[in-house]
Image (cartoon, helix red, strand yellow):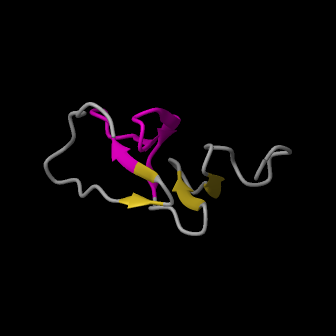
Amino acid sequence: MFAPRKIDERQELSIHCGLIVMRNDDGTFIVINTSGETVANSGRDSVSNYSEDVALVKKSGDEIYYIDKSGRRMGDPDFGR
């Protein structure tokens, strides 16, 4: 796998679709793969676990959308590639 990363004691870590959703020290979320590489890190307020290769994202305000396993937002021209 990868070198340990500091995580919040309250955070449960689980691998879904080969990815791990983690909370940063500032409260935002990142998505890493099982090699420890960051897949998505853009200041999101909430990211669900992955299911069928997509995750639900909630940003400040009322913005809600899906991202794929590479962190691309659903609806972007490159989504799913």
In the picture shown, does residue 70 fall above or below 62? above
Q: Quadrant of residue 10?
A: bottom left
Q: Is residue 50 left or right of residue 69?
A: left
Quadrant the N terminus occupies: top left
Among all residues in the image, which is located at the extreme left?
A: 9
Among all residues in the image, which is located at the extreme bottom?
A: 52
Percent of width and height locating residue 51: 54, 68
Percent of width and height locating residue 80: 76, 53
Q: Quick check: can you spot residue 42?
A: no
Magenta region's main secondary structure?
A: strand
Among all residues in the image, which is located at the extreme front?
A: 1
Q: Residue at x 61, y 43 (%)?
A: 71
Percent of width and height locating residue 54: 60, 61
**How many numbered circles does the render carry?**
0
Q: Is residue 19 left or right of residue 4?
A: right
Q: Is residue 81 left or right of residue 34?
A: right
Percent of width and height locating residue 49: 44, 62
Q: Residue at x 13, y 48 (%)?
A: 9
Q: Residue at x 60, y 61 (%)?
A: 53
Please state the extent of the stretch shown in magenta in the rendering. 21-47
Task: Confirm whether the magenta stretch covers residue 64.
Answer: no
In the picture shown, does residue 2 fall above or below 50? above
In this orientation, which residue lies closer to the viewer: 29 or 5? 5
Among all residues in the image, which is located at the extreme right?
A: 77
Q: Residue at x 63, y 43 (%)?
A: 70
Q: Quick check: can you spot residue 70?
A: yes
In this orientation, which residue lies closer to the viewer: 26 or 60? 26
